[in-house]
Amino acid sequence: MGSFSIWHWLVVLLVVLLLFGGGKVSGLMGDFAKGIKSFKKNMADDTDASMEASADKPAGSISPPGTAAGTSQGTAARQG
């Protein structure tokens, strides 16, 4: 119990083929294979343009709450 036999998998495969048809399944698998090939090709590239562009820019800084220009001016106006 808990594991499926080969007959269970054959029935599932038959139902999928009946629902979607052979053409859609083979087209889907072809697209899946193209995606894997593209992924492997991009992983093999030494440089990536998107990584180079982000490496050239310095990292921005985020000021903590209460030190923003609008907040400090509003606080100073209320205190004075």
Image (spheres, rainbow, N blue to C red):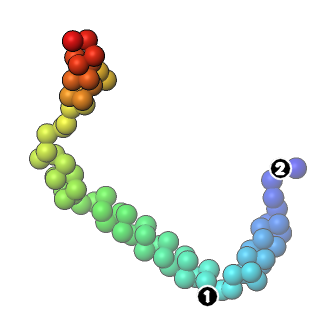
Relative horizontal placement of residue 33, taking residue 10 as reference (left or right): left
Between circles 1 and 2, the one closer to the viewer is: 1
Judge left or right: residue 38 versus residue 4.
left
Decide which of tag 1 and tag 2 comes sooner along the chain. 2
Secondary structure beneath label 2: loop
Can you give x and y, in whole percent of width and height, for residue 47 in the image? Answer: 19, 56
Where residue 36 appears, x then y in whole percent?
43, 67
Q: Identify the residue under disc 1.
A: 23
What residue do we see at 21% from left, 52% from top?
Answer: 51
With respect to residue 47, does 10 lie above or below? Answer: below
Q: Looking at the image, which residue is at 80% across and 53% down? A: 3
Mark 2 = which residue? 2
Q: Residue at x 29, y 21 (%)?
A: 66
**Quadrant including the C terminus:** top left
Q: Nearer the viewer, residue 51 or 32?
A: 51
Relative image position of residue 56 (x, y in whole percent):
11, 47
Q: Nearer the viewer, residue 66 or 56?
A: 66
Give above or below for 69 relative to 43: above
Question: Marks 1 and 2, how far apart in space?
Answer: 32 Å
Q: Is residue 46 visible?
A: no
Which residue appears farthest toward the right when viewing the image?
1
Q: Badges 1 and 2: C-beta atoms under 8 Å apart?
A: no
